[in-house]
Image: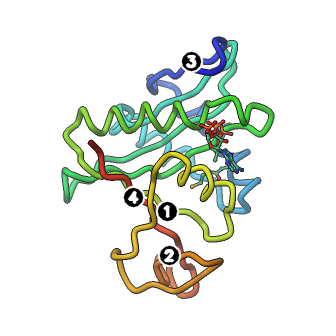
Amino acid sequence: MKDKNMKIVPCQKGDFLVLGRLNNIFAKEMGIIPTSLHTLKVAELLFRNTIQLAYHENIAIGYVLGMRSQVDKEEGWIRQLFVKKEYRGIGAGKILVQTELDVFRNLGASIVRLTTDPKNSTGIAFFKKLGFTVDKDYGETTKIEGFDAIKDFYGPGKHRIIFKKVMD
Ligand SMILES: CC(C)(COP(=O)(O)OP(=O)(O)OC[C@H]1O[C@@H](n2cnc3c(N)ncnc32)[C@H](O)[C@@H]1OP(=O)(O)O)[C@@H](O)C(=O)NCCC(=O)NCCS
């Protein structure tokens, strides 16, 4: 870990409120609808083992929210990843994802996927740096910004890049 004041803590009971606060900042930055507290409460109750929070000097600075597939136990998904702007570049995102990959591996998953907005150049650079590759075989593709995005993934015109990482 680059910064000794940083730690990663698995989601605890009651953390849905912390996740809600971080998610509101995330949603505002990305221009997306915030995740409801109801959904985050359900996430905390049902799959908090695949949610990690990052703290810096005991301040919550980011989180990763993953889900293990119920239809294919081999597969994990990273649904949300966020680090507050003022804490970026010190390794929090990387350690969150590495921790999440370890969790999925220990649960028996062998592949982890996620989606990014084709315009999210930071997210794309970050996941490429961590060894994720573009999954071109997930469905019909369309070229956006030089990448093979999955056409209409989130509905008409809402194309997404799918990244995958096959685990050792
Ligand atoms: C993506 C995000 C989580 C990265 O978090 P972070 O804590 O700044 O990332 P880290 O400091 O752990 O960086 C890890 C690696 O990615 C690289 N990286 C991070 N941001 C980058 C960027 N904008 N361009 C190029 N490389 C980048 C770092 O150089 C680092 O490489 P290294 O391991 O060789 O040093 C953060 O920028 C964020 O929350 N963005 C907004 C939300 C978002 O886009 N989430 C992903 C959506 S799918």
Q: Residues within 10 Å of mark 4 (few under 14, many from 20)?
A: many
Estimate the spatial distance between the alpha carbons at disc 4 and disc 3, rounded to whole Å: 26 Å
Task: Please name the amino acid that badge 3 sits on.
Answer: Lys
Disc 2 residue type? Tyr
Q: Is mark 2 within 8 Å of ligand 1?
A: no
> For the residues carrying marks 1 and 2, which lies nearer the camera in this image?
1
Question: Horizontal placement of 137 versus 95: left or right?
Answer: left
Q: Residues within 10 Å of mark 3 (few under 14, many from 20)?
A: some
Mark 1 residue crowding within 10 angstroms, few (<14) / some (14–19) / many (20+): many
| Quarter of the figure with the C terminus | top left
> Mark 1 highlights which residue?
115
Figure quadrant of residue 102: top left
Q: Earlier in the sequence, mark 4 or mark 1?
A: 1
Query: What residue would you read off at disc 3?
Result: 7
Q: Residue at x 51, y 86 (%)?
A: 142
Check contact, mark 1 vs mark 2: CB within 8 A. Answer: yes
Query: Where is 74 relative to 141, above or below?
Result: above
